[in-house]
Amino acid sequence: MKKRQPVRMGGPMGGGMGAGEKAKDFKGTVKKLVKYLSDFRWHMSVCVGFCGW
């Protein structure tokens, strides 16, 4: 019988299902993200509109 090869998890970068880094300032990061995305509000609403939501 043939010996099976082990199944490799992960994408092209070889990253598996490991533990990620813990967020140090989650609230601050979310606030920055919302502020950044608010500049693209019009673009996102058009995209959502075309998607049919």
Image: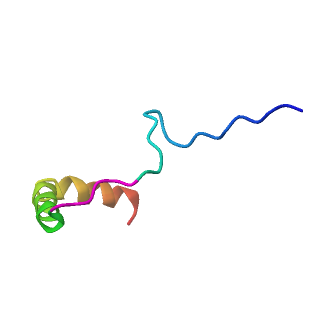
> Where's residue 25, x and y in %?
14, 63
Q: Quadrant of residue 15?
A: top left
> Where's residue 35, x and y in %?
9, 60
> Where's residue 6, x and y in %?
67, 38
Residue 26 among those drawn in magenta: no
Residue 21 among those drawn in magenta: yes
> Where's residue 44, x and y in %?
24, 56
Q: Quadrant of the C terminus?
A: bottom left
Q: In which quarter of the image is residue 5?
A: top right
Which residue appears at 22% of the width and 60% of the height? 23
Position of residue 5 relative to residue 40, above or below, is above
Which residue appears at 55% of the width and 43% of the height? 9
Which residue appears at 21% of the width and 52% of the height? 43
Indicate the colouring scheme: rainbow
Residue ranking furthest to the right? 1
Out of 48 and 39, give the one closest to the viewer.
39
Horizontal relation, residue 23 to residue 19: left or right: left
Magenta stretch: helix, strand or loop mostly? loop
Out of 2 and 36, give the one closest to the viewer.
2
Q: In which quarter of the image is the N terminus?
A: top right
What segment is highlighted magenta in the picture?
Answer: 19-24
Q: Quadrant of residue 8?
A: top right
Which residue appears at 34% of the width and 53% of the height? 20
Horizontal relation, residue 1 to residue 26: left or right: right
Out of 27 and 14, give the one closest to the viewer.
14
Label total for image: 0
